[in-house]
Image (tube, rainbow, N blue to C red):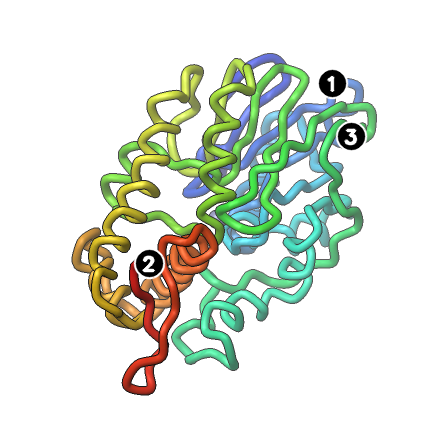
Amino acid sequence: MGYKLVHVKGNTYYLDGAAKIGIIKNTENPFLSIVVDTGLDDDSGRRLLKTMQENGMGVGAIINTHSHADHCGGNDIIKSRTGSIIYAPPFEKGIIEYPELEPFYLYSAYPLKELDTKFLKAKGTKVDYILENGELNINGVVIDVVPLYGHTPGMVGIATADKVLFAGDSFFSKDILEKHGLPYFTGIGESVSTLESLKHMGYDYYVPSHGEALTEPGDTLDANIEVLRDAVGYIADICSRALDREEIVANMVERYSIRQNITQYYLTVSTVSAFLSHMTKEGMLTTVFEDYKLKFVRK
Ligand SMILES: [Zn+2]
């Protein structure tokens, strides 16, 4: 079964999957249209190709907003069936080409076998072109590459000539924030800057990968900023006494009612680590060795 094709504006569409897939139709040659992200796996790729075909389009170029498996897992089958060119930002390129880096960096060594899953490790594909920020012409279709760092170090958004921004995972809908409590971030200062900058970009539509397309994203962006501020405040509170990272993770899991399994645990460790480096850099926390443990304490 294919995806539902949703028209946003002009030549801009998306496929309504677990992670939205952006479509920018090439009106001169619809078989050279652009897809923004490709879903999780071969099945996502097949569904994407089927839906495109049913609507008189093909894939000339794949743009990956970032390297998470649910955004680049369909690359392999689409590229092998269409010969499309893959574009990705630097940093993300490394992980798209060597996807074993993702479970490796989450775990920080050869990972536990539970982390060897398609949700954390897509099929690797060669990236043909590194995206630079700013305007780019792909087979006659002009797009704008917009830096949206924070969720991952190199994530970008893709703006179309119809003033639609495919915003990747730079922000999440309020529903998802409520359901998941604490989304995944690798850079806290970077995420806040990105969320603030998104308020003033002036696009007609903002399409996050997880959540509804929005014309007025202000409230949703504020809700995302509030989650980050709340977590900073909470960590500052509990670190009135020195705590190691394990204890801070446990506190966060309880506060945000985070599901407990091996994958989710390492994603939470990563996000908590992002808060700890950010708050240490900002002078809110300092590090101390106590009882042979590295601990963080409020300054
Ligand atoms: Zn992501």
Of residue 273 and residue 239, the one placed in the foreground of this image is 239
Gap in angstroms between the C-alphas marked 2 and 3: 46 Å
Q: Which residue is mark 2?
A: 299
Where is 294 relative to 123, above or below? below
Q: Residues within 10 Å of mark 2 (few under 14, many from 20)?
A: few
Asked which quadrant contains residue 107, the reply is: bottom left
Of residue 226 and residue 127, the one placed in the foreground of this image is 226
The location of residue 66, given as percent across then percent down, is: 58, 48
The location of residue 290, given as percent across then percent down, is: 30, 81
The location of residue 239, given as percent across then percent down, is: 25, 61
| Residue at 68% across, 60% down | 94
Label 3–label 1 contact, CB within 8 A: no
Q: Residue furthest front?
A: 299
Please name the amino acid that badge 3 sits on: Leu
Please name the amino acid that badge 2 sits on: Lys
Gap in angstroms between the C-alphas marked 3 and 1: 17 Å
Q: Which mark is residue 27?
A: 1
First along the sequence among labels 2 and 1: 1
The location of residue 127, given as percent across then percent down, is: 74, 53
Task: Examine the rendering and report whether any part of residue 141 can be seen.
Answer: yes
Q: Residues within 10 Å of mark 3 (few under 14, many from 20)?
A: some
Number of dots carrying numbers: 3
Q: In the displayed structure, does residue 151 sit left or right of residue 241?
A: right
Q: Which residue is mark 3?
A: 136
Where is 281 relative to 225, above or below? below
| Residue at 30% across, 64% down | 297
Task: Examine the rendering and report whether any part of residue 1 can be seen.
Answer: no
Please name the amino acid that badge 1 sits on: Thr
Secondary structure under badge 3? strand
